[in-house]
Image (cartoon, rainbow, N blue to C red):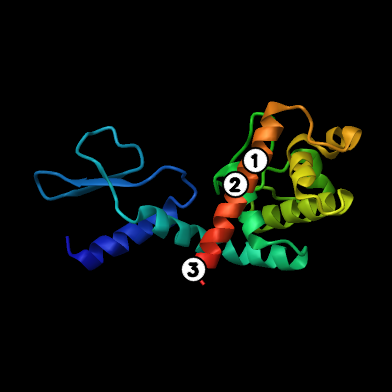
Amino acid sequence: MRPTSFFILLVLLLSLSADAEAGMYSFVDQYGRLHFTNVPADPRFKEVPGYEALRKEAVLARYGKFIRTAAERYNLDPELIKAIIKIESGFNPSAVSEKGAMGLMQLMPETAKEMKVDAPFEAEENIMGGSRYLRKLLNLFDGDLRLSLAAYNAGPNRVLKKNAIPEITETRQYVEKVLWEYNRTKADAMASQ
């Protein structure tokens, strides 16, 4: 397979699998056929070099405009929106949690309704609704990002009760994961400027 054909095939695979969290693996069999997978069951599969960087570009190409629009409209850092999406759904627009949260920003049915999101699995609508909700929480908690993230995860009433992050392990871990991812994506964005 020519290098340009390989690159075109890889980009097509990336666009189809941009929502998957796993890496991409490949090998060439004894007949010269190229095989790809994101679940390497055969030891001949080796990780495709540079896949993560290309995957990031594919994800941003797919959702970047929606993220930038929401960030502008609700006065949010686009890197914060990306961090929440990464932690909430791994950029999977079809994600559904055990508790029933839906889409990229994992909106609960009541929250989706409150934020006027009719199609929670539609990326643009989910990102706009999730960003609107995050802005509402930031306003409620006077811009305190940690409390707002805790409320995004556990619900605002649990945070308002003590004006602190609730003693819920999942919520405490969620806040730390989002903040870690947010700082990482901010650093990446600054490095690429």
State yes or no: discs 3 and 2 in contact (Cβ < 8 Å): no
What amino acid is at disc 3?
Answer: Ser
- List the residue tagged with mark 3: 192
Residue 130 in picture, x, y percent from top left: 73, 51
| Quadrant position of the N terminus in the picture | bottom left
The Cα–Cα distance between marks 2 and 1, rounded to whole angstroms, is 6 Å
Q: Residue at x 55, y 49 (%)?
A: 91
Residue 176 falls in which quadrant of the image? top right
Q: Earlier in the sequence, mark 3 or mark 2?
A: 2
Callout 2: 10 Å neighbours few (<14), some, many (20+)?
few
- List the residue tagged with mark 1: 176
Q: Secondary structure at mark 1?
A: helix
Is residue 52 shown above or below 189?
A: above
**Which residue of the protein is positioned furthest toward the bottom in this rendering?**
193
Left or right: 100, with 9 as reference point:
right
Is residue 156 shown above or below 99?
A: below
